[in-house]
Amino acid sequence: MIYGISYVALAFFLLFVGLVLGLSFYLGRKTKSAASYYAAGGRIHWSVNGIAFAGDYLSAASFLGICGMIAVSGFDGFLYAIGFLAGWIVALFLIAEPFKKLGKFTFTDALNSKFNSRAISLSASISTLIISIFYLIPQMVGAGDLVTPLLGLPHWVGVLLVGLIVILIVATAGMNSTTYVQFLKGSLLIILSTILTVYILKNGFTLTPHHENQKYHSFVELVPEMNGNEVVNVNGWEVLDQIDVKGKQFLQLRKDGKVRWFDLVKEHQHYKLKEALSITKTNDGMILFNGEPQANGNFYQVGHLSKIVMDGKEVEETGPVGPLEYLSIIEKSELVRFTNVKFDHQGQDVSLFYQNVTSGKAFMLPGLKYKIGKGAGIWSKLDFISLMLALFLGTAALPHILIRYYTVKSSRDARKSTILAIAAIGAFYILTLFMGLGAAVNGVLDVESSNMAAPLLARAFGVILFSMISAVAFATVLGTVAGLIVASSGAIAHDFMDVYLRKNLKDEAKVRAGKIAAFAVGIFAIVLGMAFKGMNVSFLVGWAFAIAASANLPAILFLLFWKKTSPTGIAASILVGITASLAIILTSPTMWERYGLDRAKAIHQLENPALISFPLAVLTIYILSLLYPKKEKFSLQKEEKTETAFT
Amino acid sequence: MNHHIVTDSESDPASGKKARLGIKFFFIYLFCYAGFVAIGVTNYELLAVEVFRGINLAIFYGIGLIVFAVLLGILYNILCSRYEDKMKEEDNV
């Protein structure tokens, strides 16, 4: 997509990033001890922590990814919002308080609090690291997407920028500053999303979504002369080629020396040629947008309604509407989505985005991404169940969320924080539905990346709103990445070096080791962020949830609720959960495509592993705890300490 | 070698009661959540049925699950706080 630099947006962006960095440095000066670095000394007020929880959780996946997926795939994107929030139920009702009572620095310490087992230290630190890295990838991808319209810079520059800023924040501060950054960001995100939703409702619907500072492209429709199924002539255009891609016919036409692609469709027994968008990589390495160099600016933002039905009548525009009316009108109307096909044409790589007229009814139901309706195969149904399972079980097992329980004083505060977080996150997710749908019909979508749906929608409504939303979204990524890097550095410096390797580090040395680890993880995240460019960030986060649900949750639940849980069982279940989920992800159709292979020929058709990997980890911990019971000394400790959540 | 952070480490006599309540609430919510997934997989067409002011069951159920989570959380906090206060009072007596 082609974006011009907005200097107002840039000014706001710099101001906000400066504020975040300033806050981090200021609070960082107070960070001297390890407790302060990793868990803010356990002194954060529950209400601040609750909103910071929301700030932590409402990562790029929520703000950029869910809005983007709703804009492109309708209700299927909202499934993520439902699942992400439902996961908090597990956290609140089963984990929050008993986990807080274990009173440790990191997830690994908590898991190991009764056993002091090196095997647990090793396996839990590996799992923390892998989950954090899988969660980091989408944040970095989102960061890259964000700077493209904001600063007019390439994707990789955005990834690099975020990586370096976050390394600086984490290396200078730690958990104390990330809590206040997350609090600030969480509050602003909810306020700005509410404002954007009010704009959407006030704007209503129109067939021609022009905006004050942004005119919508009028897509060309041509009538071809046909001979059977073949186009022989198009008035005013030169027919260059007609090709078949997976059963669809596409035409390459030329006019005034410019080459364009069209989609051949048959409507009411008549053929039509509908304008498509194309990105072509030529033999000499040039990239053409709609047959022209990028600088010509002839590549458009998309997404509009082709029919609006209000109160049973077709209308051209509606004027302001209420929230329920908004949902109801979309359901009865018809919208135009842009579907992507890729093919090789005369040795050139062509990526085509053609108009796909979709009924509002289909858009407001699951099925455009996860096929579960009539005729859906068993794999797609299993995939849907697996995704919903991962989202439900993953939240409570994310290490960077778990460590936030240690930043408040008491378990009562941990509970209150969690409830405030659920309320804030729930309200935000309802807003994402309107923001995603608003982006789908307001001609703002970038076909190259769905992640920018919400910020681009804000841009259509005004540059100030856009600049503020972009700045907050950028801070969202900064804050989440910072939290994840703190969790990862804790896993390496504390769990692995100090506990597993028994280096017996002093407090200052531990903080220094944490900062070095943060630097290494940050560099790795930058590289992965560049490698996964173009993927929807919610989809990527779904994987992190699945790994967390499989590797960590069985261990946490058994430790808290089953007295016979043994250290061998815990360590083995973590390793089985990681291995099984990673193996399924790395052989999934999406990864097959990333390797340059045919996704249809992947070993299996399951995108999300939780349905298999979670039960496997549960079975492992159960069987191995029975086969290798804990030693007598642990049983005696039980009498002295709080053993399960029921005592 | 494990390290404790600064926490309020006083014993909590209400913890067992709270844990049992949490499990009950968890299963109530799980039932509702699983119901949504089950309808999607087994009776997909039902999700398209209009249930409230032109809104289909899918949207109604989805938003309902979000709102229900918040309400259930608030109720849980009220009940847990009540257990804690009651236990504290009994201890003081």
Image: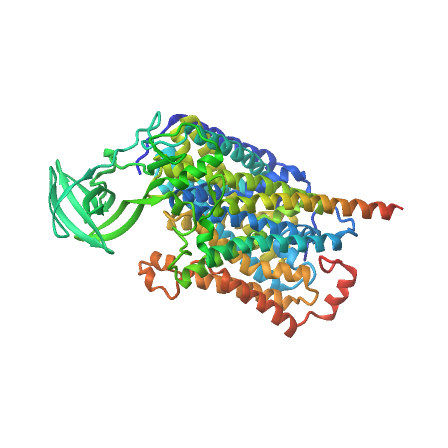
Q: Nearer the viewer, residue A314 or A440?
A: A314
Q: How is the image coloured?
A: rainbow
Q: Quadrant of residue A128?
A: bottom right
- Residue B5 at what x, y percent from top left? 69, 48
Q: Is residue A36 visible?
A: no
Q: Is residue A582 visible?
A: yes
Q: Residue furthest front?
A: A312
Total numbered circles: 0
A583 left or right of A600 in image: right
Q: Nearer the viewer, residue A95 or A508?
A: A95
Q: Quadrant of residue A119?
A: bottom right
Residue A468 against residue A509 in the figure, above or below: above
- Residue A102 at what x, y percent from top left? 70, 54
A231 left or right of B64 in image: left
Q: Nearer the viewer, residue A58 or B68?
A: B68
Residue under the point 78% across and 49% down: B10
Residue under the point 81% across and 46% down: B86
Q: Nearer the viewer, residue A6 or A276?
A: A276
Q: Residue furthest bottom?
A: A627
Quadrant the C terminus of chain A occupies: bottom right
- Residue A233 at what x, y percent from top left? 10, 44
B5 left or right of A233 in image: right
A295 left or right of A42 in image: left
Q: Residue furthest right?
A: B93
Q: Quadrant of residue A452?
A: top left
Quadrant the N terminus of chain A occupies: top left
- Residue A334 at what x, y percent from top left? 34, 41
